[in-house]
């Protein structure tokens, strides 16, 4: 906690506290979605300014109930931050918007510095880990984000310890490189509550180190791989590394 709080960086989750999906690894509740808070973009920007942040991650729950998947709220939040803090770097960690190109394009046109969308696990485990998501759709989102905005850095991440094999992990890394993903994060899955999926295996630190090296050899600009690595943690370090 001390390491996190001393950094001029933070992540904000927008669009409420309830998700329209029910992934097996996640502790976010899946209830009736919240109404859109029209003041949220300005409130996030004001909080970021008060905290004097230099790097901001804007993420959200998945909102399949909204026509644009919540893209408009991302756009407004990016704009509000830019108006108050034009030199602060912004990373967005978005849902897949059900693969809708218009929603994706709207977020990219708002000009984030990094576009992040996590694949979370290997495709074989999607029916259990991410039953309402689709591996190929997530790859499509990452591919199109680079195609639509080549200058915006792209990022993705996934967890280990859910029952995947080493070969499956290597295949995911290769798939991410095929869509020209710039950054990758690899961390250990830790069960947030007893209602979530159990940990199948705790991966040795040397395996994470090996995967990190292999990711760099494949051409990723930066790879963070370790048991405690998380998608938004120390995100500014990855950006500054480039």
Image: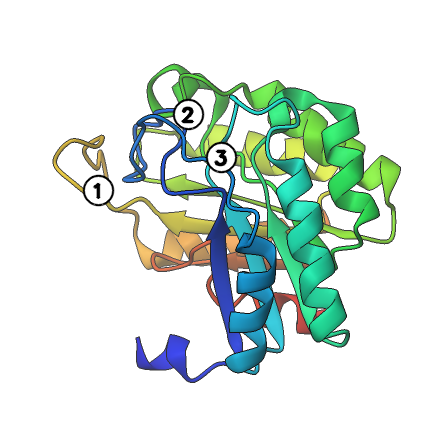
Label 1 element class: loop
- Contact, CB < 8 Å: mark 2 with mark 3? no
Residue found at x 51% / y 71%? 47
32 vs 191: above or below: above
How much space separates mark 3 and mark 1, taking CA atoms? 20 Å
Residue 91, quarter of picture: bottom right
Task: Estimate the spatial distance between the alpha carbons at disc 1 and disc 2, rounded to whole Å.
Answer: 20 Å
Residue labelled with disc 1 = 191
Q: Assign the N terminus to one quadrant of the image.
A: bottom left
Q: Residue at x 49, y 35 (%)?
A: 169
Q: Residue at x 53, y 49 (%)?
A: 59
Can you tell which of label 2 and label 3 is closer to the viewer?
2
Q: Do the residues under discs 3 and 1 have CB atoms within 8 angstroms?
A: no
Residue 152 % position (x, y): 80, 52
- Would you call the spot at circle 2 few (<14 residues within 10 Å), some (14-19), or many (20 or more)? some
How far is disc 2 from disc 3 in space, using C-alphas? Answer: 28 Å
Q: Earlier in the sequence, mark 1 or mark 2?
A: 2
Q: Is residue 151 above or below residue 233?
A: above
Which image quadrant: the C terminus? bottom right
User: Mark 3 sits on what residue?
Assistant: 169
Name the element at disc 3: helix
Is residue 200 at least partly visible in the picture? yes
Position above or below: 163 against 93: above
Left or right: 118 as drawn, with respect to 199: right
Q: Is residue 58 above or below residue 239?
A: above
Q: Earlier in the sequence, mark 3 or mark 1?
A: 3
Q: Position of residue 149 (x, y in %)?
A: 86, 44
- Dot 2 falls on a residue whose secondary structure is loop
Q: Which residue is mark 2?
A: 20
Which tag is nearer the camera, tag 1 or tag 2? 2
């Amino acid at each position: 906690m001390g390491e996190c709080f001393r950094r001029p960086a933070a992540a904000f989750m927008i669009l409420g506290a309830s998700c329209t999906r029910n992934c097996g690894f996640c502790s976010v509740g899946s209830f009736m979605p919240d109404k859109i808070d029209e003041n949220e973009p300005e409130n996030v920007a004001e909080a970021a300014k008060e905290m004097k942040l230099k790097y901001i991650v804007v993420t959200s729950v998945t909102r399949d109930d909204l026509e644009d998947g919540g893209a408009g709220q991302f756009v407004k939040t990016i704009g509000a931050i830019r108006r108050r803090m034009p030199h602060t770097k912004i990373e967005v960690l978005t849902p897949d918007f059900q693969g809708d190109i218009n929603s994706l394009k709207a977020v990219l046109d708002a000009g984030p510095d990094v576009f992040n969308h996590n694949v979370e696990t290997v495709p074989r485990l999607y029916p259990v880990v991410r039953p309402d998501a689709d591996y190929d759709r997530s790859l499509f989102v990452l591919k199109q984000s680079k195609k639509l905005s080549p200058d915006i850095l792209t990022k993705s991440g996934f967890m280990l310890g859910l029952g995947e094999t080493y070969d499956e992990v290597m295949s995911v890394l290769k798939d991410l490189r095929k869509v020209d993903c710039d950054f990758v994060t690899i961390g250990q899955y830790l069960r947030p509550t007893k209602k979530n999926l159990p940990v199948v295996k705790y991966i040795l630190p040397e395996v994470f180190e090996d995967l990190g090296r292999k990711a760099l050899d494949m051409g990723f600009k930066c790879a963070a791989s370790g048991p405690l690595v998380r998608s938004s943690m120390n995100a500014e370090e990855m950006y500054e590394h480039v």
